[in-house]
Image (spheres, rainbow, N blue to C red):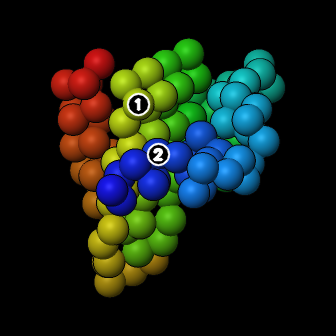
Amino acid sequence: MADERVHRTFVGLVGGQQVLPATWTDHVLQGDDTLRAHMAQEGSAQGHEYYRDCWWVFDSARGLYAGHGINGQHVYIDRSTQTVIAQHSTTPHAWEDDLMLFGTDVVMRVLERFA
């Protein structure tokens, strides 16, 4: 099942083999005051708590974070509900703020239904 493969990748397993250290996702979710202060200063229209190791963390306590790629590629992970949502799409431009905000809003609404 594709969804199971994606979920296993984000907990460090592929084909039953540990390919990422078991503590890797824990590290991403261990924000610190410096990271949070920087995000507060810069602001985040998407509601990110902080950014670490190429991951945007929405809620570290819940384990809710995302990877945002170009042209509409995104993956959202919610450890509290063991949910992974991968968005595969293409947009005319590498980054479009309005589409990003809309897509994140939709995904957050879906994830709230699982919480």
Give the SS element for disc 2: helix
**What distance separates the C-alpha of mark 2 from that of mark 1?**
8 Å
Question: What residue does disc 1 label?
Answer: 82
Q: Bin the neighbour count of mark 2 within 10 Å (Cα to Cα): few under 14, some 14-19, many 20 and up.
A: some
Which amino acid type is shown beneath numbered disc 1? Gln
Q: Based on the displayed image, in which of its 4 quarters is residue 41 positioned?
A: top right
**31 over 88 or under it: above or below:** above
Residue 66 image point, x, y percent: 50, 45
Given contact means CB atoms under 8 Å apart, are the residues at marks 2 and 1 in contact? yes
Which amino acid type is shown beneath numbered disc 2? His
Mark seen at residue 7: 2
**12 over 111 or under it: above or below:** below
At horizontal 22% and vertical 43% (from top left) the residue drawn is: 106
Q: 109 or 113: which is nearer to us?
A: 113
Mark seen at residue 22: none
Q: Bin the neighbour count of mark 1 within 10 Å (Cα to Cα): few under 14, some 14-19, many 20 and up.
A: few
At horizontal 77% and vertical 22% (from top left) the residue drawn is: 32
Q: Is residue 101 visible?
A: no
**15 over 59 or under it: above or below:** below
Residue 95 image point, x, y percent: 44, 70
